[in-house]
Structure formats: structure tokens, C-alpha cells
Amino acid sequence: MSVAQALREAAARLETISGTPRLDAELLLAHALGTGRDDLLMRQRDLSVPPGFAALLERRLKGEPIAYITGFRDFWTISLAVTPDVLIPRPDSETLIEAAVDHFGARAPGRILDLGTGSGALLLAALSQWPRARGLGVDLSPAALAVARGNAERLELADRADFRVADWAEGIEGPFDLILVNPPYIARDAALSGDVLHEPESALFSGRDGLDDYRRIAPMLPRLIAPGGMAAIEIGHDQGESVSALLANQGFSVSLRHDLAGHDRCLVATPVRPA
Ligand code: GLN
């Protein structure tokens, strides 16, 4: 079977379980060939379908996320290794980096904190964006931090990145110019489907209304943010008002940003200057 035909057939089968069947088929076939998607598409007439492709396709048809099958996911300008110990980085979360890029403009943050770093996606994206910045990634999960450290090394950012096990910012000392936070924010009883069914629950769920971790994190932020600094905090699409209120109560000025789909996705908190 030709590569073109294999991609067509695989995409047709994947339609029942995936919103991106053609992309999934390409990523799986590229992975089976040990190459990248661009290379696969460019050279498809010269390539043949390796025997391993069928098994990868079956895994995906059972619902396993592409990123856990291939072991990688692109985020911002970098590519991250991922395992089932970490949340799969999502394009939505790039909204936080965009917010920081807009805030700092020609300046650059010197010290960066990533609370709940998981794979290290936000921290490492920021460190690659600002080549002189240093950063600290915090997570409660040692298994997640092992993934993040591996990513820092692979991306040659390890000399500027520290990682520490902690319960949010407990025991962490500031100040930081930029604080990035993508906490769990899904309500405990939410009905879910897709990739999230395979991701770590500790990275997804946060109490009855999804806000428990914001309630813990918000009071920790004022002592950690440097003057002129900011926190970018990811939120669920319907949490703008409630999380803004939690941050305003801590004396922050808060603004809202949308993701590419137009959903509320990120709150930017900046210290209100003393009058
Ligand atoms: N954005 C994720 C989702 O709903 C949730 C991740 C999180 O809780 N931080 O798919």
C-alpha cells in the first residue's frame, strides 16, 4: 500500500474518535518511520508503510492520545517529551506566553516561576523566548519533574532551569518577574471525553467547582511577584469572573485574554501600584 493510501484509510478510521483524523494519521506514520511529519509529507512517494504503523493506529483507535503514543508534543517554539505522568501541552496554554511577550515588550523577565510545571512546557517555552532568563519549575509530582528535567536537558536549557517538588509555592522564595500557572481546573464531576481520560487526574481536577487550587494559589502570589512583573494564569472558559475575583482580592489588577478559539483562557495579574 502506498503512503498516500495508508494515510487516507487511517484518517477515515480515525474519524470516529478524533477531531483531527488526518493529522493523527500523519503523525503516527511519521513516528512509525522514525521521521517528522514535514519529512513524511515531502518524501511520501519514496517512502513505504512500515509494519509498526498498524499497531500504533490500533492504539490511537482505542483512544490513547497521539502525544503519549509518539512521546512528543510541540509547544510554542519547542518540542517536549511527554509521558502519562504529565498533562499534554495544549496550544491554548500558549496564550500565557503570548500574554507575557506583550507585557514585557522590549524588556525581558529575569526570573521566571512555573507553578505546576508538569512537562516543563510553560517554563521551557519562556526560557527559550528569553535567552538570559532563569527559571524555577515546581510540581507536586516527582515523576512529572523527571519529565521536565529531561526536557530541559534535551532543549539545552538545563543551566537556566531549576526544578523543585513543592505544594504550589510553599517554601518558594521570590521575587519573580514572571509567574506562569496552569493549575488543574476541571470540576470533579465534569463529564469528559478524549485525551483527558488518559491524563493524570492530579493535573486536571480541582474540587467540586474546579476552583480549589486557584483559592490556594491566589494568596501566595503577592509576595512572589516583583515590581513591574506579572502572573499569567490559565483558566477554564467559564472561570474568568470567579478567578478574577480571587486575584482582585489579593490586590491585583486583572485582565483577561482569549485563546485562538476565542474562549476566555488566561488572566494576567499585575500588582496595583501603591498610590
Ligand atoms: N485545558 C485542559 C482541558 O480541559 C485542562 C487542563 C487543566 O486543568 N489545567 O482539556
Image (cartoon, rainbow, N blue to C red):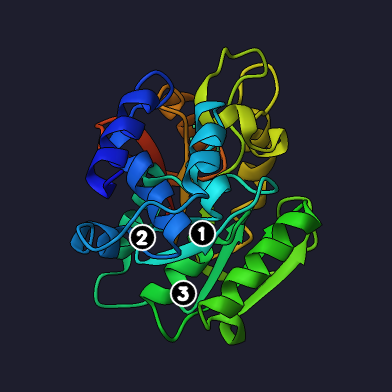
First in sequence, mark 2 or 1: give its number: 2
Residue 214 visible: yes
Residue 103 in picture, x, y percent from top left: 31, 62
First in sequence, mark 1 or 3: give its number: 1
- Residue 76: mark: 2
Which quarter of the rendered picture does the C terminus lie within? bottom left
CB within 8 Å, label 1 to label 3: no
Q: Nearer the viewer, mark 1 or mark 3?
A: 1
79 w.r.t. 111: above or below: above
- Residue 121: mark: 1
CB within 8 Å, label 2 to label 1: yes
First in sequence, mark 3 or 2: give its number: 2
Q: Residues within 10 Å of mark 1 (few under 14, many from 20)?
A: many
Report how far apart the C-alphas of labels 1 and 3 lie in the structure: 10 Å
Q: Nearer the viewer, residue 210 or 190?
A: 190
Identify the image quadrant of residue 25: top left
Residue found at x 49% / y 40%: 54
Identify residue for label 3.
127
Residue 47 in picture, x, y percent from top left: 29, 60
Residue 45 in picture, x, y percent from top left: 19, 58
Report how far apart the C-alphas of labels 3 and 2 lie in the structure: 11 Å
